Amino acid sequence: MKTAFLCAGAACALACSTSAAAHNSGADDHAPIGVMADHTHHKGEFMLSFRVMHMAMAGNQIGTDGVSDDTIATTISNRFAGMPMQPPTLRIVPQAMRSDMYMFGGMYAPSDAVTLMVMGSYVEKEMDLLTYQGGMGTTQLGTFRTNPKALGDTKVSALFPLVSRSVDDGARRDQVTLKAGFSLPTGSTTEAATVLTPMNTTSTMRAPYAMQAGTGTWDLEPALTYKGWRGRIGFGAQASAAIRLDRNKWGYAFGDVYQGTAWVSYRPARWVSVSGRVLGRSTGNVRGIDPAIMGPVQTANPDWQGGQRVDLIAGVNLLATRGALAGHRLGLELGAPIYQDLKGPQMAGDWHLTVGWQKAY
C-alpha cells in the first residue's frame, strides 16, 4: 500500500496547484480512473499514464454461499484423485490473496479520426494457503505463502471517436468512443510456487492459473463507451469484453470476460470531481487444462475459475490547472463487491483500489 500513500501526497500537491479559471478542461473530462479507453485525442497529441491496481480476496464461496475450510478439506472432491500422491478430497485451502498490477500506458493520435494506445504491465501476486494432513480429517499441518511476480500481457488498441458534440457553450456534451483492441501474450505463464504438501513435505510446481501473470493467448478486446455532461453532472457507460482467440502452448485458455459499467460524477470545481460507479462482470471457466498444474487445491481445477460479480466503486479525479503540474491528472477509485456467484469453491473478492496518473501533451 506504499504506492497509495505516495499517490495521496501527489493528490495534495495537485490540489494546491489548481485554479478553477485556468482553462476549459475539467477533472471530469475523463472517466473514473478504473475505466480505460474512454477518450480520444486530436491529431498530434499524445498522453502518458501510470496506474496501480490493488485487489484483495479473502474466504471461499460456492455459488453465493460461504464455505468453511474444514468443509472444503473433507467434502470437496479432488479432481486429480487416484493419481500418485493425490488424496480424495482437497487438502490445501486458500486463505487470502493479494494482487498488484502496475500499468504503463501511452496514447498517440496520428489523426483526429483515430487514437492509438499501448499498455504494458508488471504483476505481483501473493496467496496464503492452509495445508491439511493427507488422507481425511481436519488435522492442519500449517500455512504457506506463494508470491509469483512477472511481466504481464501487452494491450494494443485503436480508438475511434464515433460521436463528439457540444452545445450551450459546452454545458451539454456527448461522446461515443469505439475501441478495437488486442491483448498480446507477453506475460509469463510458467511462474512456479513452493507448496507445503499434505505429506508434510515441500514441493516446487507450476503455480495455478489465477497466479500466473499472463494468459498465453491472443485476445480480442473490444469496447464501446458513452460519456455525457450536463453542467456539473457527468455520466457514462461502457461495455467491454476479453475474448480468447486460441489456446496457449500449454493447452488451455482463460475464460472469456464480459463487462458492463456505468457511472455518475459531480464536479464542484473545475479541478475536482467525485464519482460513483457500478461494475458487472461475467467470467467463464478455463477451457482445457495445463498438465503441469495439478494438486489437491481448488485453484488447480479449471472448472472452478468462472462466475459473476457486481461491484460498487467510489472515485475522485483531480486536475492541476496551473503551475508546474498544470495538465497532470490524478484519479483514485475504491470498490468492493456487493454480489458474487462463483463456480467453485473459489476465493471471494474483498476490496480493490486503483490509483492512476495521466498527462496529455
Image (tube, rainbow, N blue to C red):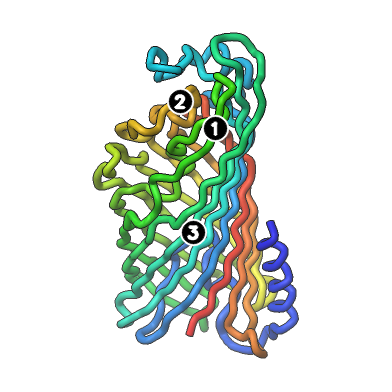
Q: Which residue is mark 1?
A: 195
Q: Position of residue 201 (x, y in %)?
A: 56, 25
Q: Are marks 3 and 1 in contact (CB under 8 Å)?
A: no
> Where 306 falls versus 154 (above or below)?
above
Q: Nearer the viewer, mark 1 or mark 2?
A: 1
Q: Position of residue 21 (x, y in %)?
A: 66, 88
Circle 3 Cα neighbour tier, 10 Å, few/some/many (<14 / 14–19 / ≥20): some
Q: Nearer the viewer, mark 3 or mark 1?
A: 1
Residue lying furthest top = 136
Circle 1 Cα neighbour tier, 10 Å, few/some/many (<14 / 14–19 / ≥20): many
Pointer 3 or 1: first along the chain: 3
Circle 2 Cα neighbour tier, 10 Å, few/some/many (<14 / 14–19 / ≥20): many
Pointer 3 or 2: first along the chain: 3
Amino acid type of the residue tagged 1 in the rendering: Val
Task: Assign a secondary structure to mark 3.
Answer: strand
Which of the 4 image quadrants contains residue 273? Answer: bottom right
Camera-side residue: 262 or 12? 12
Left or right: residue 254 versus residue 192 is left
Amino acid type of the residue tagged 3 in the rendering: Tyr
Left or right: residue 9 versus residue 127 is right
Q: Are marks 3 and 2 in contact (CB under 8 Å)?
A: no
| Cα–Cα span, label 3 and label 2 | 27 Å
Camera-side residue: 288 or 41? 288
Pointer 1 or 2: first along the chain: 1
Amino acid type of the residue tagged 2 in the rendering: Gly
- Regarding residue 336, the answer to whether it shows in the image is no
Q: Which residue is mark 2?
A: 295
Task: Assign a secondary structure to mark 2.
Answer: loop
Task: Assign a secondary structure to mark 1.
Answer: strand
Q: Nearer the viewer, mark 3 or mark 2?
A: 2
Q: Which residue is mark 3?
A: 122
Q: Position of residue 13 (x, y in %)?
A: 72, 78
